[in-house]
C-alpha cells in the first residue's frame, strides 16, 4: 500500500538527483528525446496494466482510461518529441537603440530538480503529463503520486524505473509523512495538482526556498445555460462532461448548473432521458461509470445528499451502495445556496440545478465565489457569450461544451486565484519547468563617450537624445560640441 | 518621515480598491491609456522634483537620475501606450482535431488588485516601472514605496494622486508595521523588489491567499574576464557598471570580478586609471557618484572593509566619511573566499578582484553560490562565451558589458532561484499582471456519437482513432472493416 511504504530519505534522494542534474546529462537534446520516447513506449506497451490499475483505483472503463488519460499523455509525448528542438532553441529579440550594436537572445534552460505531486482522480495523466514538460525542459524529476490511488502509484513506482533514466527520474510513494519530508528540501520547481488547502501548504513550503510553483487546483466550475441552445446536444455534453470524467471527481467537472428560468423544465426532462439512454435505468449496471474513490469521499458525498435541506431537492438518482462505492448520477433542483452541497467543490456524481433569471443573476452568483478552474456557458446568443467572458474570471472557459478545452495543447491549462497559479499543456508545459534566460551580446568596437563620467551638460544632452531616440536632438548636440571646439 | 506615517487601515483600503476594480473601470482601454499618459506626464513635468528627491535620498546626479531611472520609465510608458491595443487583443491558437469544429482563443484579463512593493535604490523606477505593467494590464494598484528612500516616498505619495485615478491607484507610505498589515490582506497579485530574506516573507504571506507573485531579488552578480578583450573598453564598462548605478547599490551591480590570472596586473592598473579619469584623484569631490543610502548600510560596508582578512587586501580606495555617507570606489585583490565581504551581496562601492585560472574555475566558484540576478562575461573567445552561457545559471547575462540588458524592453528581466521568480519589462510587464484565460468556442452542429455512452467496442475504436489522428484507422472502423 502506498502509505505503508518506508519513508525515503528525502535529503539523500535530492542529493543524488542534484548530482545527476549537475552532471549536465539531462540538458542534452538527445537525453530529453530519449526519455520522452521511453515514456511513450511505456504508456503504449503497458496500456493493459494501466487499465487494470485505474479499474482497481477508480473503476474506470477502458474507454474512459483511454479517452480521458492515455490519449492525452500520448499526444503530449508526441508533441514534445516533435517540437523539442524548436522549444529548446534560443530566440532572438529586438534590441534597444541604447545598446546598438548588440544581439539580444532569450535562452531557455531547465530550472533543475523538479518535484511533481499528483492527484488521485486522473492518477496517470496528472503524474505523467507534467513529467513530459519536465523532461522536455531538461529537468531531473521526482514524482510523488497520490496514495489515494494506490494501484496506479504502485504501477508508476514499478514501471518508470524500467523504462526511464532512474538516476534522473524517480517515483516516491507514500502519504502525508513522506510528502512533508520531501517538502522540507529545496527543489528548483514544484508542480502540484490537488486542492486549494494543500496548495497553500505547498506554496508556503516553497516560499522557504524561493521555489517557483505551478499549482493546479480546483473550484466549483459552474455551467450557465439558456434557452437558445439545442437542448438534446447540450444535455449530452453536460452529462458526459459531468459523469464520464471520473464520475464527477474532476477539477474540471461541471459542479452545478445555473439555468435560465424558462428552460428549466425542458432541460431537466431531457437530462433525465439522456441519463437513462447513457447509463440505463439502473446506472449501477453501467460499465461506463467510475466509482467513488474511497469510503471517506463516499461518506462525504452521502452526507451532502442527506442534509435535510438538500435531500428533498433530489429530482433524479440519489441511490447509493457503500460496498461498491457507488452513488447514482443525481440531479437536485434549487437547493438553498447555503446548503452544504453548495459550499464546497462537490467532486462527485451530484449535479445541483439552480434556477436563475438570466446571465446577470448567474454572473452575480459566480462572482460571489472564488475564481474556479473553468466556467462553461451554453448559449447561442453572442452578446451573452461575450458578457459571460468579459464579466467573469476563471482559469479557462468553454462556450457550448464542457471540459474539452483540456484537449487543446495550444490552450494553456491552469487556474487563477483560488483555482491555481501557472499553466501547462503543449509549450506551456516546457515553459513551466524552464527559466528563460535573457542574454545581451555586445562587441567592443562601438563606444558612446557620453556614457562615462565626468558628466558634463553636453554629455547629459547627448545621452538624453540617445535614450529618448531624439535623433535630431542627438545630431544637434554632437554638432554643438564640435562648434565649441 | 515615511516610517512615521500613521498606519493605513489595510482592509478598508483593499475593499475600496476592490470596489473600484469590480466597477470594471480599470478594464477599459481608455482608462488604461489615460493613466499611462498621466504617468508619463507626471514623470516629465516633475523631473526637477524627482531629481531633488533622488539627490536627497541617494545623492544621485541629474545624469544618473535621467539615464538610470527616468529614461527607462519614459520608455516603458511610451511602449505600453503604443502596444496596449496589441497586448490586450485575444490571441487565436490552433485547436485539437478532437474538438473540430471550434475556435480557441487566449484572452488576457487583469488579475485584479495588485500590491507593488519597491526598493530604495532605484526608488522611482522600481515603483513606477511595475506600475506601467499593472495599469496596462487593467489592474487597480497599491504602491508601497521603500521608507529607506523617504524623499522619493513622499514625492510619490504627493504626486501620484495629483495625476492619476486615486480611486484605483494608491500610494501607502510606511515601514515594517505597515507592510505587515498590507500583507495580511488578500491581493490578486504581489510584485516585490528587494532582498531574498524579505522575498521569502512576501511569498509566505502570499501563500495564505494563493496570490501569484513576482519577486525581483538580488544576488552576488559575478563578472568573469579574460585577456582576449579590449582592455580600455572593458575597464570603462566595468567601472561604469559598478559605480554608475547607485554607487554599487544595485541588484545588477557587478559584485566581484573573477579575472584570468595573466590579465590581473594589466586590468588592475587600467581600472585604477579609469576610476581616476572618471571620478578624479579624490572621488569625494566628484558629482557623479551616488552616496551610501544611510548609516546602517554605511556601517555594514565599513565593517566589511575593516575585517582583518580584508583590510590588507585593499589596493585602491578605502577612504570613507560617515557624515556624507561616502565610501571611495574601492578595489580589493584576492580576499579569502570566506571573508565576510565574499559572503553577502556587497551592495556598495567595493569591488573584490579574485584571480582564477580560467573559465572552469570561474564556473566552479559561480556554481557554489546561489543563482544570481546576472552574470557578466568579458571575453572575445566564442567558445568561452558558450561555455559560460551553458554551464551557469542566472536571471540574465551580458557578454562584454554589464547591467545593460536592463534597458532592452524585449528581454524579460527577472531572476531564478534565490534571485527571484517571474520577470517584467516590455510585454513581460503586461503579462506579470495578467491572467491569460483560455477559451474554447464550440457550436452545436457537429456531434461525434462515439463520445457518448454506452461505450461499445466500436465507439472505443472510433475515439481511439480520432484522438490519435489515425485517419486510416478511423475510416476502417466507420466502414466496419476493423474487428
Image: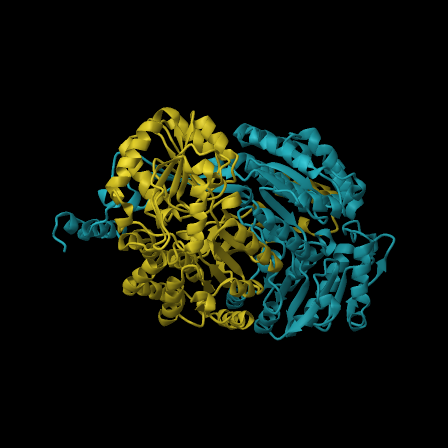
Chain colours: A yellow, B cyan
Instruction: Name the residue nearer the viewer: A454 or A259.
Output: A259
- Where is residue A473? Give x, y as percent: 63, 37
Left or right for A266, reference A464: left
Relative placement, left or right, of A440 versus A354 is right
Please provide percent x and percent y for residue A272: 29, 36
Direction from residue A379 to residue A281 in the image, left or right: left
Q: Is residue B34 above or below residue A58?
A: above
Q: Residue at x 34, y 66 (%)?
A: A38
The answer to whether residue B90 of the structure is visible from this angle is no
Give A69 or A107, whichever is nearer the viewer.
A69
Q: Position of residue B155 (x, y in %)?
A: 75, 37
The residue that appears at 52% across and 40% down in the rendered structure is A370
Q: How many marks?
A: 0
Image quarter in which the N terminus of chain A is found = bottom left
* Location of residue B176 with respect to B257 vertically, above or below: above
Q: Would you identify the image quadrant in which residue B361 lies?
A: bottom right
Horizontal side of B466 relative to A420 (left or right) equals left
Quadrant containing the C terminus of chain A is top right
Comparing A273 with A462, the one in front is: A273
Res B361 visible: yes
The image shows residue A378 at horizontal and vertical percentages of: 36, 33
Which residue lies at the image location 83% right of the left edge and 54% below the top edge?
B295
Amino acid at each position: 500500500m502506498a502509505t505503508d511504504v518506508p519513508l525515503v530519505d528525502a535529503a539523500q534522494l535530492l542529493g543524488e538527483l542534484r548530482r545527476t542534474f549537475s552532471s549536465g546529462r539531462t540538458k542534452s537534446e538527445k537525453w530529453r528525446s530519449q526519455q520522452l520516447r521511453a515514456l511513450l513506449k511505456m504508456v503504449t506497451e503497458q496500456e493493459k496494466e494501466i487499465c487494470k490499475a485505474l479499474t482497481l483505483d477508480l473503476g474506470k472503463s477502458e474507454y474512459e482510461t483511454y479517452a480521458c488519460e492515455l490519449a492525452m499523455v500520448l499526444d503530449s509525448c508526441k508533441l514534445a518529441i516533435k517540437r523539442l528542438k524548436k522549444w529548446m532553441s534560443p530566440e532572438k529579440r529586438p534590441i534597444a537603440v541604447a545598446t546598438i550594436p548588440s544581439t539580444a537572445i532569450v535562452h531557455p534552460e531547465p530550472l533543475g530538480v523538479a518535484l511533481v505531486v499528483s492527484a488521485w482522480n486522473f492518477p496517470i495523466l496528472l503524474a505523467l503529463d507534467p513529467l513530459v514538460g519536465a523532461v522536455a525542459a531538461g529537468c531531473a524529476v521526482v514524482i510523488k503520486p497520490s496514495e489515494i490511488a494506490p494501484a496506479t502509484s504502485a504501477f508508476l513506482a514499478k514501471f518508470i524505473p524500467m523504462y526511464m533514466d532512474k538516476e534522473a527520474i524517480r517515483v516516491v510513494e507514500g502519504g502525508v509523512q513522506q510528502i512533508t519530508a520531501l517538502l522540507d528540501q529545496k527543489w528548483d520547481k514544484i508542480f502540484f495538482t490537488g486542492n486549494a488547502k494543500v496548495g497553500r501548504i505547498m506554496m508556503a513550503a516553497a516560499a522557504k526556498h524561493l521555489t517557483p510553483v505551478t499549482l493546479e487546483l480546483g473550484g466549483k466550475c459552474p455551467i450557465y445555460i439558456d434557452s437558445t441552445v439545442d437542448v438534446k446536444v447540450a444535455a449530452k455534453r453536460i452529462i458526459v462532461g459531468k459523469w464520464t470524467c471520473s464520475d464527477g471527481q474532476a477539477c474540471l467537472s461541471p459542479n452545478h448548473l445555473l439555468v435560465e428560468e424558462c428552460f428549466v423544465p425542458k432541460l431537466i426532462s431531457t437530462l433525465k432521458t439522456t441519463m437513462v439512454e447513457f447509463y440505463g435505468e439502473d446506472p449501477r449496471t453501467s460499465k461506463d461509470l467510475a466509482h467513488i474513490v474511497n469510503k471517506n469521499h463516499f461518506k462525504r458525498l452521502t452526507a451532502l445528499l442527506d442534509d435535510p435541506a438538500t435531500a428533498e431537492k433530489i429530482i433524479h438518482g440519489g441511490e447509493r451502495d457503500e460496498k461498491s462505492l457507488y452513488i447514482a448520477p443525481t440531479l437536485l433542483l434549487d437547493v438553498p445556496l447555503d446548503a452544504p452541497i453548495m459550499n464546497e467543490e462537490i467532486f462527485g456524481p451530484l449535479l445541483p440545478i439552480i434556477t436563475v433569471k438570466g446571465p446577470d443573476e448567474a454572473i452575480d452568483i459566480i462572482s460571489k465565489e472564488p475564481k474556479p478552474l473553468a466556467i462553461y456557458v451554453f448559449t447561442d446568443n453572442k452578446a451573452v457569450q461575450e458578457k459571460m467572458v468579459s464579466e467573469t474570471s476563471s482559469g479557462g472557459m468553454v462556450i457550448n461544451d464542457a471540459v474539452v478545452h483540456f484537449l487543446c495543447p495550444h490552450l494553456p491549462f491552469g487556474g487563477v486565484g483560488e483555482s491555481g497559479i501557472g499553466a501547462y499543456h503543449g509549450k506551456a508545459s516546457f515553459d513551466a519547468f524552464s527559466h528563460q534566460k535573457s542574454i545581451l551580446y555586445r562587441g567592443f568596437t562601438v563606444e558612446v563617450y557620453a556614457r562615462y563620467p565626468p558628466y558634463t551638460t553636453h554629455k547629459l544632452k547627448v545621452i538624453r537624445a540617445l535614450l529618448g531616440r531624439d535623433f535630431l536632438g542627438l545630431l544637434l548636440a554632437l554638432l554643438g560640441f564640435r562648434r565649441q571646439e | 518621515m515615511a516610517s512615521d506615517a500613521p498606519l493605513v487601515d489595510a482592509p478598508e483600503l483593499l475593499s475600496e480598491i476592490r470596489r473600484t476594480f469590480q466597477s470594471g473601470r480599470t478594464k477599459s482601454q481608455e482608462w488604461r491609456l489615460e493613466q499611462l499618459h498621466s504617468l508619463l506626464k507626471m514623470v516629465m513635468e516633475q523631473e526637477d522634483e524627482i531629481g531633488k528627491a533622488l539627490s536627497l535620498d541617494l545623492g544621485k546626479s541629474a545624469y544618473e537620475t535621467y539615464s538610470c531611472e527616468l529614461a527607462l520609465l519614459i520608455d516603458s510608458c511610451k511602449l505600453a501606450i503604443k502596444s496596449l491595443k496589441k497586448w490586450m487583443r485575444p490571441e487565436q491558437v490552433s485547436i485539437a482535431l478532437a474538438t473540430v469544429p471550434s475556435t480557441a482563443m487566449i484572452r488576457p484579463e487583469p488579475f485584479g488588485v495588485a500590491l507593488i512593493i519597491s526598493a530604495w535604490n532605484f526608488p522611482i523606477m522600481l515603483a513606477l516601472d511595475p506600475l506601467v505593467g499593472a495599469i496596462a494590464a487593467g489592474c487597480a494598484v497599491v504602491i508601497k514605496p521603500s521608507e529607506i528612500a523617504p524623499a522619493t516616498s513622499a514625492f510619490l505619495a504627493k504626486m501620484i494622486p495629483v495625476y492619476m485615478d486615486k480611486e484605483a491607484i494608491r500610494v501607502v507610505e510606511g515601514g515594517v508595521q505597515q507592510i505587515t498589515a498590507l500583507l495580511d490582506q488578500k491581493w490578486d497579485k504581489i510584485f516585490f523588489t528587494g532582498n531574498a530574506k524579505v522575498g521569502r516573507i512576501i511569498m509566505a504571506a502570499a501563500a495564505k491567499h494563493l496570490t501569484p507573485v513576482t519577486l525581483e531579488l538580488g544576488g552576488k552578480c559575478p563578472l568573469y574576464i579574460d585577456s582576449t578583450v579590449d582592455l580600455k573598453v572593458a575597464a570603462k564598462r566595468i567601472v561604469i557598471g559598478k559605480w554608475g548605478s547607485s554607487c554599487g547599490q544595485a541588484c545588477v551591480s557587478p559584485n566581484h570580478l573573477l579575472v584570468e590570472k595573466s590579465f590581473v596586473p594589466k586590468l588592475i592598473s587600467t581600472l585604477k586609471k579609469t576610476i581616476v579619469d572618471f571620478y578624479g584623484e579624490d572621488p569625494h569631490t566628484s558629482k557623479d557618484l551616488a552616496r551610501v543610502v544611510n548609516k546602517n548600510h554605511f556601517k555594514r560596508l565599513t565593517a566589511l572593509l575593516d575585517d582583518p582578512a580584508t583590510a590588507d587586501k585593499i589596493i585602491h580606495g578605502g577612504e570613507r566619511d560617515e557624515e556624507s555617507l561616502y565610501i571611495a570606489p574601492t578595489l580589493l585583490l584576492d580576499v579569502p573566499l570566506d571573508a565576510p565581504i565574499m559572503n553577502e551581496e556587497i551592495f556598495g562601492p567595493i569591488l573584490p578582484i579574485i584571480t582564477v585560472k580560467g573559465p572552469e574555475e570561474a564556473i566552479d566558484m559561480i556554481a557554489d553560490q546561489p543563482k544570481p540576478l546576472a552574470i557578466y562575461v568579458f571575453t572575445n573567445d566564442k567558445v568561452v562565451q558558450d561555455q559560460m552561457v551553458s554551464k551557469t545559471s542566472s536571471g540574465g547575462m551580458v557578454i562584454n558589458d554589464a547591467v545593460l540588458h536592463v534597458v532592452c524592453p524585449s528581454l524579460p528581466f527577472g531572476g531564478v532561484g534565490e534571485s527571484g521568480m517571474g520577470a517584467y519589462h516590455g510585454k513581460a510587464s503586461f503579462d506579470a499582471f495578467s491572467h491569460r484565460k483560455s477559451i474554447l468556442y464550440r457550436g452545436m452542429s457537429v456531434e461525434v456519437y462515439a463520445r457518448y455512452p454506452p461505450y461499445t467496442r466500436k465507439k472505443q475504436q472510433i475515439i481511439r482513432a480520432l484522438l490519435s489522428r489515425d485517419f486510416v484507422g478511423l475510416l476502417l472502423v466507420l466502414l466496419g472493416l476493423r474487428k
